[in-house]
Amino acid sequence: MSLERFREIRREVHEDEVINLNPIQRGGVLTPAARRALVEFGDGYSICDRCPPKTPRLDMIERPPVKSFYEELAKFLGLDVARVVTRCREAMFIALYMLGDRGGYVVLDSLAHYSTYLAVELARMKVKEVPNTGYPEFRVEVEKYKEKIEEVIDETGDPPVAAVLTHVDSYYGNLADAKAVGEICKRYGVPFILNAAYTAGVMPVNGKELGVDVLVSSGHKSWAASAPTGILAMTEEMAQRILKTSEIKGDLTGRSFPVKELGLLGCTVMGAPLATLIASFPDVVERVKRWSEELEKARHFASEMEKIEGTRLLGVKPKMHTLMHFESMGFYKVSQSHKRRGFFLYDELKKRKIYGIQPGLTKHFKLNTYGLSWDQVRYVASAFKEIAEKYGLEVV
Ligand SMILES: *Cc1c(COP(=O)(O)O)cnc(C)c1O
Protein backbone atom coordinates (compact mmCIF):
# COMPACT_ATOMS: atom_id res chain seq x y z
CA MET A 1 0.00 0.00 0.00
CA SER A 2 1.51 3.27 -1.07
CA LEU A 3 0.60 6.63 0.39
CA GLU A 4 -0.26 7.75 -3.14
CA ARG A 5 -3.13 5.27 -3.30
CA PHE A 6 -4.19 6.29 0.18
CA ARG A 7 -4.42 9.92 -0.92
CA GLU A 8 -6.37 9.45 -4.15
CA ILE A 9 -9.93 10.12 -2.98
CA ARG A 10 -8.88 12.72 -0.50
CA ARG A 11 -7.15 14.72 -3.20
CA GLU A 12 -10.21 14.50 -5.43
CA VAL A 13 -12.44 16.23 -2.88
CA HIS A 14 -9.74 18.48 -1.48
CA GLU A 15 -8.70 20.52 -4.48
CA ASP A 16 -9.23 24.23 -3.97
CA GLU A 17 -12.04 24.73 -6.43
CA VAL A 18 -14.00 21.68 -5.28
CA ILE A 19 -17.08 22.13 -3.10
CA ASN A 20 -17.68 19.30 -0.61
CA LEU A 21 -21.26 19.21 0.64
CA ASN A 22 -20.88 16.10 2.79
CA PRO A 23 -22.68 17.00 6.04
CA ILE A 24 -19.92 15.64 8.27
CA GLN A 25 -17.16 17.57 6.48
CA ARG A 26 -18.21 21.23 6.58
CA GLY A 27 -17.44 22.16 10.20
CA GLY A 28 -14.19 20.22 10.40
CA VAL A 29 -12.22 22.11 7.77
CA LEU A 30 -9.03 23.31 9.45
CA THR A 31 -8.16 26.97 9.89
CA PRO A 32 -4.72 27.99 8.54
CA ALA A 33 -3.45 28.15 12.14
CA ALA A 34 -4.63 24.60 12.78
CA ARG A 35 -2.98 23.34 9.60
CA ARG A 36 0.35 24.75 10.82
CA ALA A 37 -0.18 23.26 14.28
CA LEU A 38 -0.81 19.87 12.73
CA VAL A 39 2.71 19.80 11.33
CA GLU A 40 4.39 21.40 14.34
CA PHE A 41 2.80 18.98 16.79
CA GLY A 42 2.94 15.94 14.54
CA ASP A 43 5.45 13.97 16.60
CA GLY A 44 4.08 11.44 19.08
CA TYR A 45 3.35 12.86 22.51
CA SER A 46 4.11 16.40 21.36
CA ILE A 47 2.01 18.05 24.10
CA CYS A 48 3.77 16.26 26.95
CA ASP A 49 7.29 17.73 27.25
CA ARG A 50 6.35 19.92 30.22
CA CYS A 51 3.95 17.58 31.99
CA PRO A 52 3.98 18.61 35.69
CA PRO A 53 5.70 15.82 37.68
CA LYS A 54 3.51 16.20 40.78
CA THR A 55 0.21 16.16 38.87
CA PRO A 56 1.03 14.26 35.68
CA ARG A 57 -2.16 14.72 33.74
CA LEU A 58 -3.03 16.29 30.37
CA ASP A 59 -5.37 18.93 31.81
CA MET A 60 -2.65 20.10 34.23
CA ILE A 61 -0.15 20.99 31.49
CA GLU A 62 0.53 24.72 31.34
CA ARG A 63 3.15 24.73 28.55
CA PRO A 64 1.58 24.49 26.01
CA PRO A 65 -1.47 26.00 27.78
CA VAL A 66 -3.77 22.98 27.87
CA LYS A 67 -5.00 23.89 31.36
CA SER A 68 -6.16 27.38 30.45
CA PHE A 69 -7.60 26.14 27.14
CA TYR A 70 -9.82 23.69 29.03
CA GLU A 71 -10.96 26.52 31.31
CA GLU A 72 -11.79 28.77 28.36
CA LEU A 73 -13.53 25.91 26.58
CA ALA A 74 -15.79 25.26 29.59
CA LYS A 75 -16.61 28.95 29.84
CA PHE A 76 -17.37 29.18 26.12
CA LEU A 77 -19.93 26.39 26.54
CA GLY A 78 -21.46 27.93 29.67
CA LEU A 79 -20.26 25.06 31.87
CA ASP A 80 -17.68 24.61 34.64
CA VAL A 81 -15.27 21.89 33.56
CA ALA A 82 -14.13 20.63 30.14
CA ARG A 83 -11.94 17.82 28.87
CA VAL A 84 -10.90 16.82 25.38
CA VAL A 85 -11.33 13.15 24.54
CA THR A 86 -11.07 11.28 21.24
CA ARG A 87 -14.60 11.60 19.89
CA CYS A 88 -18.11 12.76 20.71
CA ARG A 89 -19.14 9.11 21.09
CA GLU A 90 -16.35 8.50 23.57
CA ALA A 91 -17.43 11.52 25.60
CA MET A 92 -20.95 10.09 25.60
CA PHE A 93 -19.74 6.66 26.69
CA ILE A 94 -17.57 8.07 29.48
CA ALA A 95 -20.42 10.20 30.84
CA LEU A 96 -22.91 7.32 30.83
CA TYR A 97 -20.46 4.78 32.21
CA MET A 98 -19.42 7.00 35.08
CA LEU A 99 -22.96 8.14 35.92
CA GLY A 100 -24.79 4.84 36.03
CA ASP A 101 -24.70 1.16 36.73
CA ARG A 102 -25.06 -1.87 34.53
CA GLY A 103 -28.70 -2.46 33.60
CA GLY A 104 -29.80 1.14 34.05
CA TYR A 105 -31.96 3.02 31.58
CA VAL A 106 -30.98 5.90 29.35
CA VAL A 107 -33.83 7.97 27.94
CA LEU A 108 -32.87 9.22 24.47
CA ASP A 109 -34.46 10.82 21.42
CA SER A 110 -35.37 8.55 18.53
CA LEU A 111 -33.17 10.58 16.16
CA ALA A 112 -30.01 9.89 18.19
CA HIS A 113 -26.86 8.97 16.26
CA TYR A 114 -26.09 5.24 16.10
CA SER A 115 -23.03 5.83 18.26
CA THR A 116 -25.25 7.02 21.12
CA TYR A 117 -27.04 3.66 21.09
CA LEU A 118 -23.68 1.88 21.01
CA ALA A 119 -22.40 3.98 23.91
CA VAL A 120 -25.44 2.87 25.93
CA GLU A 121 -24.88 -0.74 24.89
CA LEU A 122 -21.19 -0.72 25.76
CA ALA A 123 -22.03 0.78 29.15
CA ARG A 124 -24.29 -2.28 29.55
CA MET A 125 -27.39 -0.14 29.81
CA LYS A 126 -30.78 -0.06 28.08
CA VAL A 127 -32.54 2.59 26.00
CA LYS A 128 -35.95 4.14 26.38
CA GLU A 129 -36.73 6.09 23.22
CA VAL A 130 -38.62 9.36 22.95
CA PRO A 131 -40.68 9.33 19.73
CA ASN A 132 -40.62 11.80 16.88
CA THR A 133 -43.54 12.97 14.74
CA GLY A 134 -42.40 11.06 11.62
CA TYR A 135 -42.78 12.17 8.00
CA PRO A 136 -42.27 14.89 6.93
CA GLU A 137 -41.14 16.88 9.98
CA PHE A 138 -39.56 14.20 12.19
CA ARG A 139 -39.75 16.54 15.15
CA VAL A 140 -38.64 14.94 18.43
CA GLU A 141 -41.53 15.19 20.87
CA VAL A 142 -39.48 16.70 23.65
CA GLU A 143 -42.45 17.06 26.00
CA LYS A 144 -42.50 13.23 26.15
CA TYR A 145 -39.23 13.08 28.07
CA LYS A 146 -41.50 13.50 31.09
CA GLU A 147 -43.58 10.37 30.46
CA LYS A 148 -40.54 8.32 29.42
CA ILE A 149 -38.72 9.22 32.65
CA GLU A 150 -41.86 8.25 34.57
CA GLU A 151 -42.10 4.97 32.64
CA VAL A 152 -38.57 4.11 33.78
CA ILE A 153 -39.40 4.99 37.38
CA ASP A 154 -42.60 2.89 37.27
CA GLU A 155 -40.81 -0.05 35.70
CA THR A 156 -37.66 -0.10 37.82
CA GLY A 157 -38.31 2.05 40.87
CA ASP A 158 -35.33 4.20 39.93
CA PRO A 159 -34.90 7.24 37.72
CA PRO A 160 -32.94 6.73 34.49
CA VAL A 161 -29.14 7.07 34.53
CA ALA A 162 -29.47 10.10 32.26
CA ALA A 163 -31.59 11.69 29.56
CA VAL A 164 -29.82 12.29 26.26
CA LEU A 165 -30.98 14.77 23.64
CA THR A 166 -29.45 15.15 20.19
CA HIS A 167 -29.32 18.92 19.81
CA VAL A 168 -29.29 18.78 16.01
CA ASP A 169 -29.77 15.33 14.54
CA SER A 170 -27.73 13.93 11.68
CA TYR A 171 -30.73 12.81 9.60
CA TYR A 172 -32.90 15.92 9.16
CA GLY A 173 -30.84 18.66 10.76
CA ASN A 174 -33.66 19.49 13.17
CA LEU A 175 -32.81 21.67 16.15
CA ALA A 176 -34.44 20.17 19.25
CA ASP A 177 -35.74 22.28 22.14
CA ALA A 178 -33.00 21.56 24.66
CA LYS A 179 -34.29 24.01 27.23
CA ALA A 180 -37.60 22.13 27.49
CA VAL A 181 -35.77 18.85 28.13
CA GLY A 182 -33.46 20.58 30.62
CA GLU A 183 -36.46 21.74 32.65
CA ILE A 184 -38.02 18.27 32.73
CA CYS A 185 -34.72 16.66 33.76
CA LYS A 186 -34.24 19.19 36.54
CA ARG A 187 -37.68 18.43 37.95
CA TYR A 188 -36.82 14.73 38.17
CA GLY A 189 -33.20 15.17 39.18
CA VAL A 190 -32.04 13.25 36.08
CA PRO A 191 -28.69 14.26 34.55
CA PHE A 192 -29.25 15.89 31.17
CA ILE A 193 -26.66 15.09 28.48
CA LEU A 194 -26.81 17.23 25.35
CA ASN A 195 -25.25 15.80 22.20
CA ALA A 196 -23.96 18.94 20.51
CA ALA A 197 -21.93 17.18 17.77
CA TYR A 198 -23.58 19.32 15.07
CA THR A 199 -24.09 22.50 17.10
CA ALA A 200 -21.33 23.50 19.55
CA GLY A 201 -18.45 24.98 17.54
CA VAL A 202 -20.62 26.22 14.68
CA MET A 203 -23.51 27.92 16.49
CA PRO A 204 -23.83 29.52 19.93
CA VAL A 205 -24.57 26.92 22.62
CA ASN A 206 -24.72 27.80 26.30
CA GLY A 207 -25.05 24.80 28.57
CA LYS A 208 -26.17 26.72 31.60
CA GLU A 209 -28.94 28.55 29.73
CA LEU A 210 -30.25 25.26 28.36
CA GLY A 211 -30.15 23.51 31.74
CA VAL A 212 -27.54 21.05 30.51
CA ASP A 213 -25.51 18.96 32.98
CA VAL A 214 -23.15 17.40 30.44
CA LEU A 215 -22.40 18.53 26.89
CA VAL A 216 -20.61 16.34 24.37
CA SER A 217 -19.38 17.46 20.97
CA SER A 218 -17.13 16.49 18.10
CA GLY A 219 -13.95 18.44 17.29
CA HIS A 220 -13.55 16.92 13.83
CA LYS A 221 -17.19 17.61 12.97
CA SER A 222 -17.76 21.10 14.29
CA TRP A 223 -14.61 22.72 15.71
CA ALA A 224 -12.24 22.99 12.74
CA ALA A 225 -10.04 20.28 14.27
CA SER A 226 -8.45 17.04 13.09
CA ALA A 227 -9.82 13.65 14.10
CA PRO A 228 -9.88 12.34 16.67
CA THR A 229 -11.11 15.05 19.03
CA GLY A 230 -14.19 15.08 21.22
CA ILE A 231 -15.41 17.50 23.84
CA LEU A 232 -16.75 16.54 27.24
CA ALA A 233 -17.98 19.55 29.22
CA MET A 234 -20.00 19.53 32.42
CA THR A 235 -21.10 21.22 35.61
CA GLU A 236 -18.92 21.04 38.70
CA GLU A 237 -21.42 18.64 40.25
CA MET A 238 -21.18 16.25 37.30
CA ALA A 239 -17.38 16.54 37.27
CA GLN A 240 -17.30 15.06 40.79
CA ARG A 241 -18.82 11.88 39.37
CA ILE A 242 -17.64 11.75 35.77
CA LEU A 243 -14.02 12.76 36.45
CA LYS A 244 -13.63 10.67 39.57
CA THR A 245 -10.00 9.76 40.18
CA SER A 246 -8.49 6.29 40.42
CA GLU A 247 -8.65 4.30 43.67
CA ILE A 248 -6.96 1.07 42.65
CA LYS A 249 -4.02 -0.22 44.70
CA GLY A 250 -1.53 -2.86 43.59
CA ASP A 251 -2.04 -5.92 45.81
CA LEU A 252 1.66 -6.66 45.85
CA THR A 253 3.32 -3.31 45.38
CA GLY A 254 0.69 -0.98 46.80
CA ARG A 255 1.07 1.14 43.69
CA SER A 256 -1.70 3.72 43.28
CA PHE A 257 -2.56 6.55 40.87
CA PRO A 258 -4.82 8.96 42.75
CA VAL A 259 -4.16 11.86 40.36
CA LYS A 260 -5.46 10.02 37.29
CA GLU A 261 -9.02 10.51 36.13
CA LEU A 262 -10.43 7.01 35.83
CA GLY A 263 -13.01 7.49 33.06
CA LEU A 264 -10.35 9.07 30.85
CA LEU A 265 -7.86 6.26 31.61
CA GLY A 266 -5.51 9.03 32.73
CA CYS A 267 -4.76 11.00 29.57
CA THR A 268 -6.53 11.28 26.22
CA VAL A 269 -5.45 13.30 23.16
CA MET A 270 -1.78 14.07 23.72
CA GLY A 271 -0.67 15.34 20.33
CA ALA A 272 -1.51 16.92 16.98
CA PRO A 273 -5.34 16.68 17.05
CA LEU A 274 -5.51 18.57 20.35
CA ALA A 275 -3.10 21.17 18.95
CA THR A 276 -5.44 21.75 15.96
CA LEU A 277 -8.43 22.19 18.27
CA ILE A 278 -6.54 24.74 20.36
CA ALA A 279 -5.23 26.54 17.27
CA SER A 280 -8.72 26.91 15.76
CA PHE A 281 -10.43 27.89 19.00
CA PRO A 282 -10.11 31.71 18.63
CA ASP A 283 -11.70 31.42 15.15
CA VAL A 284 -14.43 29.14 16.46
CA VAL A 285 -15.30 31.67 19.19
CA GLU A 286 -15.74 34.27 16.45
CA ARG A 287 -17.50 32.13 13.87
CA VAL A 288 -20.42 31.11 16.08
CA LYS A 289 -21.38 34.80 16.13
CA ARG A 290 -22.00 34.61 12.40
CA TRP A 291 -24.52 31.77 12.69
CA SER A 292 -27.51 33.83 11.56
CA GLU A 293 -25.85 34.40 8.19
CA GLU A 294 -25.25 30.65 7.86
CA LEU A 295 -28.98 30.14 8.43
CA GLU A 296 -29.83 32.74 5.80
CA LYS A 297 -27.68 30.92 3.25
CA ALA A 298 -29.22 27.55 4.17
CA ARG A 299 -32.77 28.86 3.89
CA HIS A 300 -32.02 30.51 0.57
CA PHE A 301 -30.54 27.28 -0.72
CA ALA A 302 -33.50 25.20 0.44
CA SER A 303 -35.99 27.51 -1.25
CA GLU A 304 -34.01 27.29 -4.50
CA MET A 305 -33.99 23.49 -4.32
CA GLU A 306 -37.74 23.39 -3.76
CA LYS A 307 -38.19 25.09 -7.12
CA ILE A 308 -37.17 21.78 -8.70
CA GLU A 309 -40.08 19.53 -9.66
CA GLY A 310 -40.89 16.95 -6.98
CA THR A 311 -38.27 18.21 -4.54
CA ARG A 312 -38.99 19.05 -0.93
CA LEU A 313 -37.06 19.76 2.20
CA LEU A 314 -37.79 17.29 4.98
CA GLY A 315 -37.57 18.16 8.66
CA VAL A 316 -38.85 21.17 10.55
CA LYS A 317 -39.18 24.47 8.65
CA PRO A 318 -37.82 27.05 8.63
CA LYS A 319 -34.33 25.57 8.82
CA MET A 320 -32.56 26.20 12.10
CA HIS A 321 -29.40 24.44 10.93
CA THR A 322 -27.33 24.13 7.76
CA LEU A 323 -27.72 20.33 7.45
CA MET A 324 -30.56 19.58 5.05
CA HIS A 325 -32.34 16.46 3.93
CA PHE A 326 -34.12 16.61 0.58
CA GLU A 327 -36.63 14.23 -0.85
CA SER A 328 -36.65 14.41 -4.63
CA MET A 329 -39.23 12.42 -6.51
CA GLY A 330 -38.06 14.44 -9.53
CA PHE A 331 -34.45 13.24 -9.55
CA TYR A 332 -35.73 9.79 -8.59
CA LYS A 333 -37.97 9.75 -11.67
CA VAL A 334 -34.96 10.62 -13.85
CA SER A 335 -32.89 7.84 -12.26
CA GLN A 336 -35.49 5.23 -13.20
CA SER A 337 -34.77 5.55 -16.92
CA HIS A 338 -31.11 6.66 -16.81
CA LYS A 339 -28.50 4.04 -17.71
CA ARG A 340 -26.42 5.07 -14.70
CA ARG A 341 -29.52 4.87 -12.50
CA GLY A 342 -29.19 6.96 -9.34
CA PHE A 343 -25.52 7.60 -10.05
CA PHE A 344 -26.39 10.16 -12.71
CA LEU A 345 -26.84 12.87 -10.08
CA TYR A 346 -23.44 12.18 -8.56
CA ASP A 347 -21.86 12.17 -12.03
CA GLU A 348 -23.47 15.47 -13.01
CA LEU A 349 -22.45 17.15 -9.76
CA LYS A 350 -18.92 15.80 -10.07
CA LYS A 351 -18.63 17.36 -13.54
CA ARG A 352 -19.38 20.66 -11.82
CA LYS A 353 -16.80 19.97 -9.08
CA ILE A 354 -19.43 19.44 -6.42
CA TYR A 355 -18.90 16.46 -4.14
CA GLY A 356 -20.42 15.02 -0.99
CA ILE A 357 -23.84 13.80 -2.12
CA GLN A 358 -23.73 10.08 -1.53
CA PRO A 359 -23.21 8.32 -4.92
CA GLY A 360 -26.38 6.58 -6.12
CA LEU A 361 -28.87 8.55 -4.06
CA THR A 362 -31.62 10.63 -5.63
CA LYS A 363 -34.88 10.09 -3.74
CA HIS A 364 -33.32 11.14 -0.47
CA PHE A 365 -30.05 12.94 0.01
CA LYS A 366 -28.41 15.12 2.63
CA LEU A 367 -26.05 18.05 2.38
CA ASN A 368 -24.65 20.83 4.51
CA THR A 369 -24.01 24.39 3.35
CA TYR A 370 -22.08 25.45 6.48
CA GLY A 371 -19.12 27.71 5.68
CA LEU A 372 -19.83 28.06 1.96
CA SER A 373 -19.69 31.60 0.59
CA TRP A 374 -22.82 33.16 -0.89
CA ASP A 375 -21.29 32.67 -4.33
CA GLN A 376 -20.73 28.99 -3.65
CA VAL A 377 -24.26 28.54 -2.32
CA ARG A 378 -25.68 30.17 -5.44
CA TYR A 379 -23.39 28.11 -7.67
CA VAL A 380 -24.49 24.82 -6.07
CA ALA A 381 -28.19 25.76 -6.25
CA SER A 382 -27.91 26.67 -9.92
CA ALA A 383 -26.01 23.43 -10.60
CA PHE A 384 -28.90 21.38 -9.19
CA LYS A 385 -31.41 23.40 -11.19
CA GLU A 386 -29.34 23.09 -14.38
CA ILE A 387 -29.15 19.30 -13.95
CA ALA A 388 -32.90 19.15 -13.34
CA GLU A 389 -33.62 21.08 -16.53
CA LYS A 390 -31.18 18.99 -18.53
CA TYR A 391 -33.29 15.91 -17.72
CA GLY A 392 -36.61 17.58 -18.40
CA LEU A 393 -37.72 18.36 -14.88
CA GLU A 394 -39.67 21.53 -14.38
CA VAL A 395 -37.91 24.34 -12.51
CA VAL A 396 -40.21 27.16 -11.47
C1 LIG B 1 -21.33 12.87 14.00
C2 LIG B 1 -22.11 12.59 15.22
C3 LIG B 1 -21.57 11.82 16.25
C4 LIG B 1 -20.20 11.17 16.14
O1 LIG B 1 -19.18 12.08 16.43
P1 LIG B 1 -17.71 11.47 16.69
O2 LIG B 1 -16.93 12.63 17.17
O3 LIG B 1 -17.22 10.97 15.37
O4 LIG B 1 -17.87 10.40 17.71
C5 LIG B 1 -22.32 11.60 17.37
N1 LIG B 1 -23.54 12.12 17.51
C6 LIG B 1 -24.09 12.90 16.55
C7 LIG B 1 -25.45 13.48 16.78
C8 LIG B 1 -23.40 13.14 15.39
O5 LIG B 1 -23.97 13.89 14.43
Image (cartoon, rainbow, N blue to C red):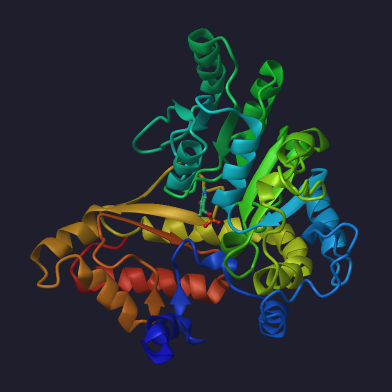
Q: Is residue 211 above or below residue 5?
A: above
Q: Nearer the viewer, residue 53 or 21?
A: 53
Q: Position of residue 59 (x, y in %)?
A: 81, 58
- Residue 197 visible in the shown view: no
Vertical relation: 230 (above or below) 46: above
User: Looking at the rendering, in which quadrant would you find the N terminus?
Assistant: bottom left
Q: Residue at x 53, y 28 (%)?
A: 102
Q: Residue at x 43, y 34 (%)?
A: 110
Q: Is residue 385 left or right of residue 276?
A: left
Residue 4 location (% of width, % of height): 40, 91
Instruction: Report x, y in % for residue 214.
Output: 69, 39
Determine whether 208 is above or below 84 in the image: above
Q: Is residue 8 left or right of residue 287?
A: left
**302 is higher (above) or lower (below) than 206:** below
Residue 390 at x, y percent in the picture = 22, 74
Figure label count: 0
Along the viewing direction, whichever of 143 and 162 lies nearer the viewer: 162
Question: What's the residue at 43%, 43% (across, down)?
Answer: 315
In this view, the residue in front, 21 or 291, is 21
Occupied quadrant, residue 243: top right
Q: Residue furthest front?
A: 252
Quadrant in which the C terminus is drawn? bottom left
> Is any atom of residue 19 visible in this view?
yes
Residue 345, by quadrant, is: bottom left
